Image: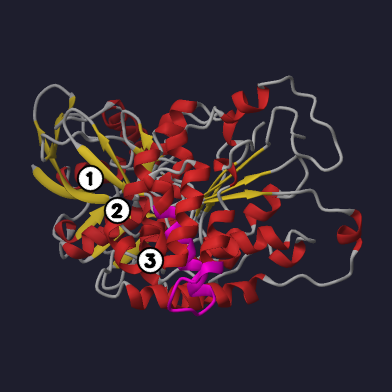
Amino acid sequence: MLVKTFGSAVYGIEAITITIEVNITGGNPNYFIVGLPDSAVRESMSRVEAALQTNDLRMPRQRILVNMAPADIKKEGSAYDLTIATAILAASGQIEADELDKYLIMGELSLDGSLQPIKGALSIAIQARKEGFKGFILPIQNAREAAIVNDLAVYGVENITQVAEFFNGDKKLQPTIVNTREEFYDSLSNYDSDFSDVRGQENIKRALEIAAAGGHNVILIGPPGAGKTMLAKRLPSILPPLSLHESLETTKIHSVAGKLAAADALVTTRPFRSPHHTVSDVALVGGGSNPQPGEISLAHNGVLFLDELPEFKRTALEVMRQPLEERRVTISRAKFTVDYPSSFMLIASMNPCPCGYYNHPEKECICPPGTVQKYLSKISGPLLDRIDLHVEVTPVNFNELASDRLSEKSDQIRERVIKAREVQTERFSSKPELHANAQMSPQMVREVCKINTAGQTLLKKAMEKLGLSARAYDRILKVSRTIADLAGSEEILLEHLAEAIHFRSLDREGWAG
């Protein structure tokens, strides 16, 4: 008997429906799976057999042929176990097959018949609704994640027995219901860290406020213990809250990567990713034989923090250059290409030298001559060009640490950032792909960031003295436009331009001796 069930494959962050055809015929008991399955899929027959036997269901002792269509797309992973098992039960007459074509079924089977969570449940649910399926049956751990898709009945099941009883009409499954908007707004902007925890460092907070307002990349340079990591971790708390569209897009990426907890339905706060400096190129930008999103995509709509930037492998840093400009990363293989969005704010931190105390007001640097320049040269010029704000972080003195004066809360800073972003939203209303000043093209910079004659003179002197590139010139104009937006000014004034030039520390002659 021939029976069809439906599963799904995820490529990039989009899903493709896969038809599982099972034909049981007479002859010697053999199992065959065709349609470009990988090792995990071929091993599924062993898991299916054990799961059926453990739950008092019968594995047919006949010739079983499983075809996974379309046959030219490679099928990977163990999430097809439940799809195949359901088709075998229907083909052998153990469950009714009348309703099978109305449901999309996915799940990895354990040997006792229980189900393990799958990756990409949200992308699969979106595709299932698009193709008109009545419902989606999947492991209960992924039910809340998939249930944020409206107009699709999502049934979370714990084991294969529940699936068999459901199709036989012996047991009704209750669909998982999630109020997407309520879920979104209830946990919006719930951050554990706040800028009020940071004593002193007002100039650094100002730099991060500018960065948040315009979506600019930042590098913090300072000695150990000056508060670079503490400040970086609080940056998401002053960014504008995620929109519902951004939340769904971010959730989809984390779903594909298997990073969502069972209790989570949506990612409602800006992601903050902080990979260790030993991270590989593939782990950072994504890829692999079975492509997965990297850290830069997991930081989409949020912040990527690279602590101790010079300690990262140069190759890993260089592969970030293109995603920083294009805000997406393309993974190409011989037979297919996938795109992952990667629109993130980069915030990096570093010591000024190996010992960490170059330019320290109190401690002496013990590095030999030339070491500082060699240390800084680990970061390429093209990468530094793509970082808008270079900020020197100085140690906090005792009086500031012991002071009882309350620092400004993140909520207060965020209000100013949101106002500046609203100005930018109106400015870029004709270009929906643009959200912040940092995303402007060179052509738009010339149109939007116009400066007067005095500003031109100041910028010319800065260009000549600092030896700035054309890209750095554009960055200064973008930052000055953001500073003007924060000040509520329609024009870029001289003080806005001067402050933007001030945030190019690493371009100054003699900074590294």
Q: Quadrant of the C terminus?
A: top right
281 left or right, relative to 372: left
Real-space Cα distance between discs 3 and 2?
64 Å
Q: What residue type is labelled 3?
A: Cys
* Mark in front: 3 vs 2: 3
Q: What residue type is labelled 1?
A: Leu
Residue 449 image label: 3
Q: Do the residues labelled 1 and 2 touch (CB within 8 Å)?
A: yes
Q: Is residue 97 above or below residue 430?
A: above
Picture residue at 48% right of the left edge, 79% below the top: 489
The prevailing secondary structure element of the residues shown in magenta is helix
Real-space Cα distance between discs 1 and 3?
66 Å
Residue under numbered circle 2:
164
Q: Give the percent coordinates (x, y) of residue 188.
A: 53, 72
Determine the secondary structure under disc 1: helix
- Tell me the quarter of the picture where residue 265 sits: bottom left
Determine the secondary structure under disc 2: helix
Question: Residue 240: in sight, yes or no?
Answer: no
Closer-to-camera residue (250/441): 441
Q: Give the percent coordinates (x, y) of residue 407.
A: 77, 70
- Are there few (<14), some (14-19), or many (20+) residues within 10 Å of tag 3? some
241 left or right, relative to 393: left
- Are there few (<14), some (14-19), or many (20+) residues within 10 Å of tag 2? many
Residue under numbered circle 1:
89
Q: Is residue 419 above or below residue 106?
A: below
Picture residue at 86% right of the left edge, 60% below the top: 400
Q: Which amino acid does label 2 sit on?
A: Ala
Q: Quadrant of the N terminus?
A: top left
Q: Earlier in the sequence, mark 1 or mark 2?
A: 1
Numbered range of the magenta stretch: 474-495
